[in-house]
Amino acid sequence: MFFHAVLMRLVDADAAFVARVEAYAARVRAELPCVRDYHFGPNLAARAGEYPWLVVATFDSEEDHERYQVSQVHQEMKAFMAPRIVQIVVGDIDTANPALRRG
């Protein structure tokens, strides 16, 4: 499995903005068979610090993740969100490929 997590600090994340990003997330789930699971929402961790929003995605492989990265819906979502992203941290892990793990 390949896991992709994006933690974000956003400005002006009003209800209309959040609804539109949630609609993009629904499109990702509906339009991209390479995506196993995909969610955007508030970071519920009490220790989230400056990252109160996140995207969590699951793929069968790194190749599926790469297909998602270049997909039209993902590019549209990124373009819509970019002006409101103040800070971002991205993390990926491939549990099927231990050779890629840093030690």
Image (tube, grey):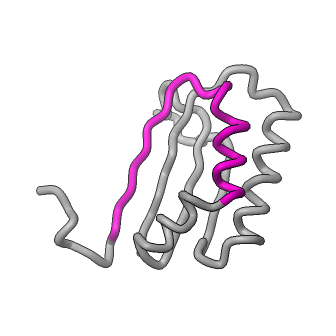
Estimate the x, y position of residue 75 in percent, counting from the top left.
65, 50
Above or below, 87 against 91 in this view is: above
Please give the name of the residue rendered at 17% of the width and 71% of the height, measured from the top-left corner.
99
| Region in magenta | 72-94
Q: Pick the residue in front: 43 or 95.
A: 95
Please give the name of the residue rendered at 73% of the width and 37% of the height, measured from the top-left corner.
80
Above or below, 81 against 21 in this view is: above
Q: Quadrant of residue 15?
A: top right
Horizontal side, residue 99 vs residue 7: left or right: left
Estimate the x, y position of residue 63 in percent, counting from the top left.
43, 73
Please give the name of the residue rendered at 53% of the width and 68% of the height, measured from the top-left corner.
67
Estimate the x, y position of residue 66 in percent, counting from the top left.
47, 64
Horizontal side, residue 77 vs residue 44: left or right: right
Q: Is residue 19 magenta?
A: no
Horizontal side, residue 25 vs residue 59: left or right: right
The C terminus appears in which quarter of the rendering? bottom left
Q: For the image shown, how many numbered marks are present on the structure?
A: 0
Q: Is residue 83 magenta?
A: yes
The N terminus appears in which quarter of the rendering? bottom left
Estimate the x, y position of residue 58 in percent, counting from the top left.
52, 68
Most extreme residue toward the right is 16
